[in-house]
Image (spheres, helix red, strand yellow):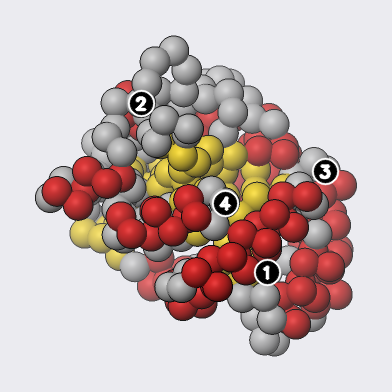
Amino acid sequence: MSERSIFSNLVRQPDGAFSAVYGAFLLQSALQPIFREREDGRLQIAAFKGLIRASVDGDPAAPTDFFHTVPEDERAAVDGLCRSLHILNTGALGRQDIALLVNFQKGLYDTPQAMRQEVERLRLCTHEAGMAPEAIVCELREHPLDDPDVLAQFAGRLRENGFSIAIDEYTGEDRDLERLERLKPQYVTFDTAWLHGFAENSAGLALLRVVLGQFAQKGIRTVVAGIEDPGMVARCREMGGPLMMGYLLARPELAPTSFNSTYPERGGAPLQTPPESFAAGLSAPAETRASRPVRHFGRRGVQAAKSDRFIG
C-alpha cells in the first residue's frame, strides 16, 4: 500500500460511518466513551478510545490475527489506516469538546522517514475530519525492546505538530517517572490492577488525590480504565475525579454510534442514567455490526467502483 493509496481503502457506508477494506478484511471503528462526572453526578463524554474491529465475511477476527496477515512493508500504512478510521468517525459526530485516544503498533515509527510519514497521515486525516490536532491523543506504549530516545523523538514530532501524547499503565515507579519526563504527556492512564490495590483503603486514596493534583498542576489529565463496579466510581470521586472508562459505564459501539443521543454534548441533561443504576441490573449495550458499505472518502467525494471484496 503506497502513501498515495492509503485513503483509497476507505469506505463511506450509507449510514455515514467510515470503514476500510484490506484484502479479505473489513475494518470497522469502535468508539468507547471516556467520561467525566458532572457536579450533578451525571456523565459527560470527555473523550473516546478508538478500537479496531476486523471481520471476514461477517465473522469477527481478532485484531492481532489481522495484523499478523499484513506484510511487514505495509504495517505502518495499515496501522495509520486504522487510526484514520477512528479520527474520521469521531469527527463525523460533530462534537466540539471531545478528544480521541488512538494507539500505535510497536516498532513501526523508529526512523525519521517513518515518523514524518505518520505525522503527515495524521495531519491529513485530522484536517479531513474537521478536528483540532490537540484533540488527537497519541497513546505511546513503551515496550522492553523499544529505544526510549527514539520514542521520545517520535513524541516530540507529534507535539511539534500540535498532537497530544498519552502514556498507559502508569504505576508511579521509577520507569514511569522517567516516561513522564521523556514523553511529556497530556494524558496518563493508570494501570488498573495497581490502581485498585491503592484505592482499597483511605491511605491509598489520599496518595492518589495527591498524585492527581500534581498531574493537574502540570496540565495532565488522568484516566481510570476498567470501571466495572459502582464502588470504583465512588472511589474515583474520592481521589479527585479522574476521567473514567469501562464496560459498567458504556461499551464500545461501532460507528455510527448512539452516543450523541444518549450523551448529548450541549442543551440538556444526558439521557443516560448515572453509573449507580447499573448496579440495579442495567447493562451497557453491546456492539452491533454495520451494513454493507459504499466506497467514497470524506467531503471530497472521491468515488470508486464497488468491489466484490466488500464485506457486510
Tags 1 and 2 touching, CB below 8 Å: no
Query: Does residue 119 show up?
Result: no
Q: Which amino acid type is marked by label 4?
A: Gly
N-terminal label among 1 and 2: 1
Residue 90's place in the image compared with 289, above or below, is above
Residue lying at 61% horizontally and 55% vertically, measured from the top left = 222
Q: Nearer the viewer, mark 2 or mark 3?
A: 2
Outermost residue, front side: 202
Q: CA distance from mark 1 to mark 2?
A: 40 Å
Q: Nearer the viewer, mark 2 or mark 4?
A: 4
Q: Quarter of the image containing the C terminus? A: top left
Q: CA distance from mark 3 to mark 1?
A: 19 Å
Report the residue marked by disc 3. Answer: 161
Outermost residue, left side: 281
Residue 61's place in the image compared with 177, above or below, is above
Q: Nearer the viewer, residue 287 or 205?
A: 205
Q: Which amino acid type is marked by label 3?
A: Asn
Report the residue marked by disc 4. Answer: 240
Q: Residue 235 location in percent, x, y?
A: 44, 59
> Dot 1: few (<14), some (14–19), or many (≥20) neighbours within 10 Å?
some
Q: Which amino acid type is marked by label 1?
A: Leu
Q: Residue 99 location in percent, x, y?
A: 59, 39
Q: Residue 185 location in percent, x, y?
A: 74, 57
Q: Mark number for residue 270? A: 2
Residue 72's place in the image compared with 145, above or below, is above
Q: Quarter of the image containing the N terminus? A: bottom right
Tags 1 and 4 touching, CB below 8 Å: no
Report the residue marked by disc 1. Answer: 108
